[in-house]
Image (spheres, rainbow, N blue to C red):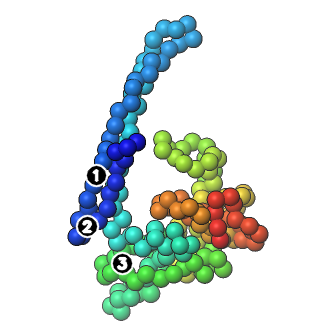
Amino acid sequence: MSNQAKVWIEKKAYKIKGEFSSLEANTPIRREDGKLCGVTNPRRLVHMHSYGGEAPFFEGLAKGKLLGTQCGNSKCESQGSIYIPFRICCPDCLAKMKIVDLTAAAKKNAKIYTYVVTSRTGAFNTLEVPIKFIDVQIGEAVTLLKSYLLLSEPEIGKRVIPVFRAKPTFTITDLAWVAAGAKKPPKGFRF
């Protein structure tokens, strides 16, 4: 595509160039006997998604780091509480949170809190099925992180360690988990 969608920041403003939507030729849908039953209407849409204050979390995943946040407000009842997934403001006092690196804690003390295995996914799912969705409890964090498990079967209480996509997509799927003690990461991932 010669006029591919491009987005960049210039003087603190988004700049865009190129095609953000396109149509493709319709294709007939026919029964075995050749009778027309319908038509496909292929469309392509490029979606711009701004991370805003959450950008450090996704940048961290690309660098093999798992970042959370912590309330540092001495007047807040939740002072010192650690949150993963990443939060910009404290949910109790609304003070800006401080970024904390949870990578070491995740490698040492993360476990499956609960899980679900599914083969039915959303329209734009890029994960291989069946998907082993897990809720991960990491160290002293007061929240759970939703993610997915690779290479082994999920069990409540099972120790897991994070793996990071070798070629980052800058999305949440850059982070996955494997059973603690895994000798090598899955193909396309790194410890």
SS type, badge 1: strand
Q: Position of residue 86 (x, y in %)?
A: 44, 72
Name the side, left or right, on which 150 lies relative to 138.
Answer: right
Q: Residues within 10 Å of mark 1 (few under 14, many from 20)?
A: few
Q: Which residue is mark 1?
A: 17
Q: Nearer the viewer's eye, disc 3 or disc 2?
A: 2
Q: Residues within 10 Å of mark 3 (few under 14, many from 20)?
A: many
Q: Position of residue 135 (x, y in %)?
A: 57, 63
Which quarter of the image is occupied by the N terminus? top left
SS type, badge 3: loop
Using the image, tell me which numbered label, if any, was put on residue 90: 3
Name the residue located 60 percent from the left edge and 81 percent from the top edge.
104
Name the residue located 51 percent from the left edge and 68 percent from the top edge.
62
Q: Nearer the viewer's eye, disc 3 or disc 1?
A: 1
Name the residue located 74 percent from the left edge and 67 percent from the top edge.
184
Using the image, tell me which numbered label, if any, was put on residue 10: 2
Asked if labels 1 and 3 touch by Cβ distance under 8 angstroms, the answer is no
> In the rendered structure, which amino acid carries the disc numbered 1?
Lys
Name the residue located 36 percent from the left edge and 78 percent from the top edge.
90
Asked if labels 1 and 2 touch by Cβ distance under 8 angstroms, the answer is no
Instruction: Give the alpha-carbon distance from disc 3 to disc 2, as whole Å.
Output: 30 Å
